Image (spheres, rainbow, N blue to C red):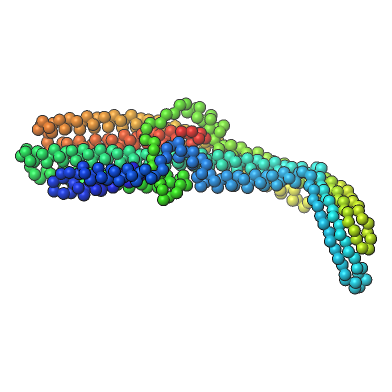
Amino acid sequence: MNSVYIAIQGFVFALATTNAAFASPTTSVQSQSQSASESQSMVPSLTLAQAADRARSASFDVRAAVEAARAARADAVSARAGLRPQLAISATALDANLGQLGMPVASQAYVGLISSLPLFTPSLRSTARALEMTADAATSDVEAARNDAFFAAVQAYRRAQLAVAIVAARGEAVRDQQAHLDVTARRIRAGKAPRYVLARDRAALAVALQAREDAAADGDEAINDLTLVLALDPSTPPQIATALDVASLDGTLDRFIDRALVQAPMVLAAQLREEAARSTVTAARGAYEPTATLSAQSYDGTSSPQLGRSGGQVTLVASLPIVDGGTRLAIADKARSTLAQARVALEKARASTQHDVRNAWRELQAARVNLTTARAGADDAAEQLRIARIRETAGKGIEIEVLDALSVAATARETAVKAVARFDTAVALVHHASGDLTL
């Protein structure tokens, strides 16, 4: 909304300055400021910390990953249930009245209790273990989604912050151009400058106004992007409440690499999937080992003709595969192949994590140097503009000198704020690569 306000303000201001005298833009600007302030009060304010917190919990990808992890956990619980005692109640009601072909007329009404207990099922136990590891990996995928959503939110917020800062910088450029135009108009009235230079200065002001309008449009787009990243209501985009400032980062490259290898979600998920694949190999081997299951059944009821009121049975089933036609070897070989792929994926995850941290750290170093040079350039441009204005006031400078200084100063201000945004994004990139969910 800051950018919307400035864009509307700039539009009205442009209309005012196209009048012949360029005389009194103050009244229209003040009225627009009042109306914009009223509209801003209706828009929710959002800090960087609030944006990061929402991204961790409410972004689309995070919510989808949470549901996928829940489904994987349900599969693991279902498999583990097969290792526990089972108990069921059955009811039988029969009324047979087909007295044909020697079939008896009979009726039955029984209630039964059926129970079973797996005694030795190595394959099922290993399968359950593999599914538990897969569920844990899915939980790590949730953390990876949180990490990605956090970084995406920080990126989007930094872009919105940058847009607001650029709008402010271009607003300052507009004020500088307007001030220069006012000086030119006074010089013309005093007979110290030719009238044709007024058109040139008006053109420079128009360019500055259009630049500010373009920045306002970019700002609105950045806020809309942030709204989508955070899964907010598109009809009420937030107002950026945290000003762009230089972020801080403590630690060395080696420290961040070590931290990444321990906590990066991509590495953790790959480790868990490697353990799941190892359990799958054990399950494939156990599928052809002896199994034993104990079951019991009881019943109580009536029948006609009389078959006995109650009874029960206990069954022990043991099996040992002898000949399978090569199925066992094929399944075991497939499981070993899956394990080998998981190990390669884990190795790649560790290498990729180190690669990402190193690249992020290099970008941080470049951004730090860029920040220093950009600030120095902005300071130098401001000083050159001050000198040009002094020369203009003293009548010792040429007309184009101030315009050039204004242009250089405006570009230097934008370069400085872009350098801050680049540095802050690089800090967030280091955190993202190392698996940190901190600002």
> In the displayed structure, would residue 94 be above or below residue 149?
below
Q: Please, which residue is most extreme toward the left here?
A: 191
> In the displayed structure, would residue 331 be above or below residue 430?
below
Is 422 placed left or right of 109 in the picture? left
Residue positioned 68% across, 44% down in the render: 76
User: Residue 407 appears in which quarter of the rendering?
Assistant: top left
The answer, for residue 318, to whether it is visible in the render is no
The answer, for residue 163, to whether it is visible in the render is yes
> In the displayed structure, would residue 86 be above or below residue 382?
below
User: Residue 120 appears in which quarter of the rendering?
Assistant: top right
Residue 209, given in percent of the width and then of the height, sits at 24, 45
Residue 71, given in percent of the width and then of the height, sits at 63, 47
Is 50 placed left or right of 137 in the picture? left
Residue positioned 27% across, 35% down in the render: 412
> In the displayed structure, would residue 324 be above or below residue 380?
below
Residue positioned 53% across, 32% down in the render: 260
Residue 393, given in percent of the width and then of the height, sits at 12, 32
